């Protein structure tokens, strides 16, 4: 059914809305609008044409209309029509649009040629069409003006194969801008062609003791250090980090449940950022790490801590590294290694971080708002301690993370979890099943009144007043503290993260609890205090 348009309808205005899709009958008017000297209108028209083409009845009618217009148009409209065809190819792969662009690569108008070449270089990633590479190589073999030559080189770097790499390597030029485009195209194409299946195997022991940085939420360092003492020689590495001189295969470090990620720090370097990073990555130290645990092509990407993407800087670093260590391939999309770069105190620090699946928390099948990160729950368990006769209660069970981490820590007598939200209890049941933990008593109940006979350990992450129960949670926390004090078995423990540490500490003392541990912890955007009390 055709929608009626008002009398004052203007197609030129309507195309400015991304939600407006023109009719196929509008195409001739849209093509006429491309002749207007208005850059914003031209862009809107191109996008509108692409929406028609991508629609359920677009077929190749838009391409035919544009091809017919090209038969009679002159510059600069020809170049705009070529750009419109490129938009169609970007929206939906169209053989007809692609063929039209290939023909325009040899157009008499250089702007039209260049727009066609640029469009072909933007074909969807992974789409390899031999005719595109062949056409671009035939064009590359001709004497070309610098702007067009740069565009052809860039396009070949993105959609070419081995023949394109040979052709780019063979090019000789004194034009600095063209040389820059060539180098970038060669780097990108080498990376693409060098992609093979790469795996990281952290099960291999290091040939010599090696430094490993294990990162945790700031505030959890003491419990992380305790976990690491049985795995090597831990050293305090700074805020949110523990450093370990490890002799065991890195996979064994996942026995610790408190760290969030691990990495291998390289020796700090001085000098310019790009030179320092390139020197670190091309070093024997880096090679030893990367070669020990990589199976296949060594691929890496750069991550600038606190510095955004920095694409130009990343490209310059990749060039330097490629010249010094050709076996390393910079690959920002499919890299098993991340080089984390941080400049601090006059030094540049580079850490090699392997991207591997974390085997510790696969039980996280379901989540709920405000649920603990498993490393926070694990640290809470470590701080409270685990006893074989524990009767454990989590009054705000959520997704059951604390209960699961307590079960992972060692034997216990009973596990109880309560929550007022039935969706949370459903998530908790699913996660407990995924973790293979049976016999847990889950109930819908109020934390201020529920009774667990003989409870010896209360372990929980209560509402923080941010994502659930927004507002002043102080009265609720006071009531829970008082209720827990009445329930706890002699020598029982109560451990939680408090968003109001002074208030809850005072409430606990007032009802006869003794504070044994308190430490400020980064909860991910805000802080709370890990508090442990005993009766």
Image (cartoon, rainbow, N blue to C red):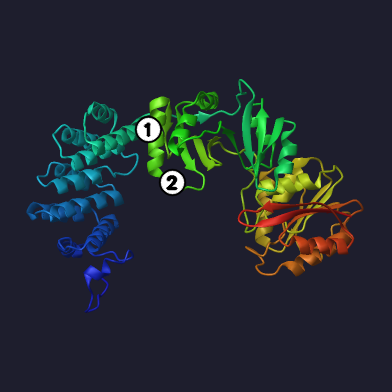
Q: Can you name the residue that lies furthest to the right here?
A: 490
What residue does disc 1 label?
Answer: 319
Is 108 rendered above or below residue 213? Answer: below
Quick one: label 1, few (<14), some, or many (20+) residues within 10 Å?
some
Q: Quadrant of the C terminus?
A: bottom right
Question: Can you give x and y, in whole percent of width and height, for residue 312 in the image?
Answer: 37, 42
Image coordinates of residue 109 in percent, x first then y, are 11, 47
> Front-most of 142 and 519?
519
Q: Secondary structure at mark 1?
A: helix
- The foreground one among 146 and 480 is 146
Residue corresponding to mark 2: 309
Q: Earlier in the sequence, mark 2 or mark 1?
A: 2
On screen, residue 470 versus residue 104, left or right, reads: right
| Side (left or right) of 61 relative to 475 | left
Image-based side of 369 in relation to 323, left or right: right
**Residue drawn at point x = 27 percent, y = 69 percent:** 14
Residue 198 visible in rendering? no
Q: CA distance from mark 2 to mark 1?
A: 16 Å
- Determine if residue 81 is in view: yes
- Residue in the picture at 20% in, 63% down: 38
Residue 409, x across and y down, in percent: 76, 41
């Amino acid at each position: 059914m055709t929608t009626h348009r008002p009398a004052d309808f203007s197609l030129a205005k309507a195309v400015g809305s991304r939600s407006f899709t023109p009719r196929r009958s509008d195409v001739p008017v849209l093509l006429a609008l491309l002749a207007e000297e208005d850059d914003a209108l031209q862009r809107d028209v191109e996008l509108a044409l692409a929406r028609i083409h991508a629609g359920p009845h677009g077929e190749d009618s838009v391409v035919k209309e544009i091809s017919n217009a090209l038969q009679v148009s002159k510059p600069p409209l020809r170049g705009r029509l070529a750009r419109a065809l490129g938009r169609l190819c970007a929206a939906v792969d169209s053989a007809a649009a692609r063929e039209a662009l290939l023909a325009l690569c040899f157009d008499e108008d250089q702007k039209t040629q260049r727009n066609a070449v640029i469009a072909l270089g933007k074909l969807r990633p992974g789409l390899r069409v031999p005719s595109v590479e062949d056409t671009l190589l035939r064009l590359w073999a001709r004497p070309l003006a610098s702007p067009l030559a740069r565009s052809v080189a860039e396009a070949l770097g993105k959609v070419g194969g081995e023949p394109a790499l040979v052709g780019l390597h063979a090019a000789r030029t004194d034009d600095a801008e063209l040389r820059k485009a060539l180098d970038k195209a060669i780097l990108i194409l080498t990376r693409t062609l060098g992609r093979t299946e790469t795996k990281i195997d952290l099960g291999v022991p290091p040939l010599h003791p090696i430094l490993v940085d294990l990162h945790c939420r700031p505030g959890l360092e003491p419990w992380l250090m305790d976990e690491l003492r049985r795995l090597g020689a831990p050293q305090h590495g700074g805020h949110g980090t523990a450093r370990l001189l490890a002799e065991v295969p890195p996979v064994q470090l996942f026995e610790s449940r408190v760290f969030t990620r691990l990495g291998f720090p390289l020796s700090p370097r001085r000098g310019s950022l790009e030179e320092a990073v390139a020197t670190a990555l091309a070093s024997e130290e880096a090679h030893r790490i990367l070669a020990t645990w990589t199976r296949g092509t060594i691929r890496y990407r750069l991550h600038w801590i606190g510095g955004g993407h920095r694409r130009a800087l990343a490209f310059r670093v990749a060039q330097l590294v490629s010249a010094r260590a050709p076996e390393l391939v910079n690959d920002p999309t499919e890299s098993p290694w991340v080089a984390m770069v941080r400049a601090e105190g006059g030094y540049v620090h580079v850490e090699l971080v392997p991207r591997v699946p974390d085997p510790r928390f696969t039980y996280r099948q379901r989540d709920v708002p405000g649920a603990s990160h498993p490393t926070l729950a694990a640290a809470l368990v470590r701080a409270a301690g685990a006893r074989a006769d524990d009767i454990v209660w989590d009054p705000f069970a959520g997704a059951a993370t604390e209960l699961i981490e307590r079960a992972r820590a060692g034997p216990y007598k009973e596990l109880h979890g309560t929550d007022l939200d039935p969706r949370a209890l459903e998530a908790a049941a699913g996660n407990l099943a995924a973790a293979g933990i049976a016999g847990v008593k889950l109930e819908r109940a109020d934390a201020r009144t529920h009774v667990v006979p003989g409870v010896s350990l209360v372990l929980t992450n209560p509402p923080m007043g941010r994502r659930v129960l927004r507002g002043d949670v102080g009265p609720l926390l006071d009531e829970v503290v008082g209720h827990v004090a009445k329930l706890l078995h002699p020598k029982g423990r109560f451990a939680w993260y408090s968003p109001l540490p002074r208030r809850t500490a005072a409430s606990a003392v007032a009802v006869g609890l003794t504070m044994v541990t308190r430490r400020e912890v980064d909860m991910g955007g805000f802080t709370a205090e890990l508090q442990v009390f005993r009766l």
